[in-house]
Structures are given as C-alpha cells and as structure tokens.
C-alpha cells in the first residue's frame, strides 16, 4: 500500500509499536470473528499468527540523526501465507483511504496486490526490509551471536511444519545490517536486517515472502524484500 504521512516524522515508539493493532483492525473490519479467533487462538489449533507486515517505509525521507522522518512516497506491505486470511486482508486494504498508525495518519495513495515471480526448489537468498527478531532463553540475538542460526532455523522449521511443507536446511547468514532497537508496548525488540541463504521448497519460499523471518512478524519485523 502506497501512503503519505500527515507528520514529518514518526515517534520511535510508533515505528513498529502500532503494527499488530493495525493488522487486527484491518482484519476485524471485514471479518470480526476471524480476527478475534486468530488473536486469541492462532490458526487451526496452532498458536502461530500467520501474517506479516512492515513498519511504514519512506523513500526520499530527509536524513536527520535520531529521527524517523517521513515523506510523501511511503509504503506499508502486508501479507499472509494463509489464503483465507490473505483474502480478508486484501478486501480490507482495497476499501481504505487512510490508516491510523499510532499518532500518525497515513493517507492511501494506491494499493497493489503483489504477486512475485514463482520460486524454484533449491538454493535461495532472501533479504529483509525490517530487522529480524531472534531470541534464545529470553535474550535477543544478533547475527554472529551463539545460537543465532540455530534459533532462526528453529523458527523456520516451526513455520514449515505449520504449513505442512518440508523444512529448509543449510541456513547461512550472508550479510547483516546494524543493530536496531525499538520499543513495542513498553518492551524492547532488538534485531538486525539480514541476507540469508538456504535450501528450501519453492512453496515455502513463497509463503515466507508473505509472512517473514524470525519472531514478531505481526509487529512488522522480518519482512522479506
């Protein structure tokens, strides 16, 4: 969804903080029962929330140290690997003229359903647009830390099992961005954007592109470019 903000910058707590509430409001405006069920129970007996989104991303935003600046050329990406959820999401987004994102209002300039090129089985590289959140024993991990690849692989395997697809293997981190820290509902989220490689089933790669890597994808983390 292409958007423009009504403010010159977002408060740092509003970069990722409103994401989950925005997603549930979008789903609930079209199907309140589905939204409440996913919120309370997950999907079909599993606690995972099978959807993802980004924080608002702004092209050409002026660089200002310590400030998350906006521009008239912004976008927010939404997705789900579950067709029933994706259909409700598309219907909701198509009817919107604005989205309330924390203390900002994002005016909708356009809306497109993105269908990426079909993936193929085998080696694949994925790069994220937002930081990937990974934890081990309540500690946030960054690429290069002990257990990082292990815990990210665990998350991928869990998602593959949820979707009934083969788990990927041979996961490697090829590149990592700087450490990023955001506050979400009064608590920190720490992570970094990454470029990873793995061997994966094409169907799983397509599902990940509308879900994301790592934890807290419902909060706007781990979205794949």
Image: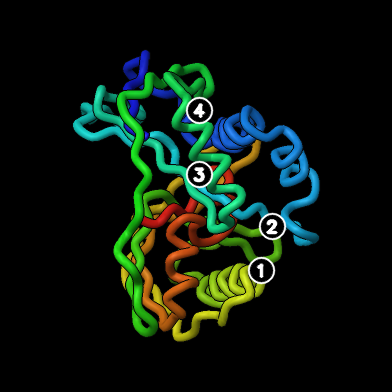
Report helix, strand or loop for mark 4.
helix
Q: Which is nearer the N-term, disc 4 or disc 2? A: 4
Residue 216 x/y as whole percent: 59, 51
Mark 4, residue position: 14
Mark 2, residue position: 48
Report helix, strand or loop for mark 3.
loop
Cα distance in 3D space between marks 3 and 4 = 11 Å
Front label number (1 vs 4): 1
Q: Which is nearer the N-term, disc 1 or disc 3? A: 1
Q: Residues within 10 Å of mark 1 (few under 14, many from 20)?
A: some
Report helix, strand or loop for mark 2.
loop
Cα distance in 3D space between marks 1 and 4 = 30 Å
Q: Which is nearer the N-term, disc 2 or disc 1? A: 2
Q: Is residue 111 above or below residue 145?
A: above
Query: Residue at coordinates 42% horizontally, 83% vertically from top-left?
Result: 199
Mark 3, residue position: 220
Cα distance in 3D space between marks 3 and 2 = 15 Å
Mark 1, residue position: 162
């Amino acid at each position: 969804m292409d958007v423009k903000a009504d403010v010159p910058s977002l408060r740092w707590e509003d970069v990722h903080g409103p994401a989950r509430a925005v997603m549930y409001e979008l789903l609930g405006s079209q199907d309140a029962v589905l939204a409440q069920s996913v919120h309370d129970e997950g999907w079909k007996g599993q606690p995972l929330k099978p959807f993802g989104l980004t924080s608002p991303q702004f092209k050409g935003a002026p660089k200002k140290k310590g400030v998350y600046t906006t521009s008239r050329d912004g976008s927010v990406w939404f997705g789900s690997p579950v067709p029933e959820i994706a259909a409700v999401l598309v219907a909701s987004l198509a009817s919107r003229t604005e989205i309330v994102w924390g203390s900002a209002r994002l005016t909708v300039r356009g809306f497109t359903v993105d269908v990426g090129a079909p993936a193929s089985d085998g080696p694949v590289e994925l790069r994220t647009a937002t930081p990937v959140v990974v934890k081990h024993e309540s500690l946030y991990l960054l690429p290069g830390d002990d257990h990082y690849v292990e815990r990210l692989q665990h998350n991928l395997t869990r998602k593959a099992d949820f979707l009934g697809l083969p788990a990927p293997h041979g996961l490697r981190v090829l590149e990592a961005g700087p450490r990023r820290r955001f506050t979400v509902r009064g608590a920190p989220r720490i992570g970094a954007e990454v470029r990873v490689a793995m061997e994966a089933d094409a169907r799983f790669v397509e599902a990940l592109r509308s879900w994301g890597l790592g934890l807290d994808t419902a909060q706007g983390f781990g979205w794949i470019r």
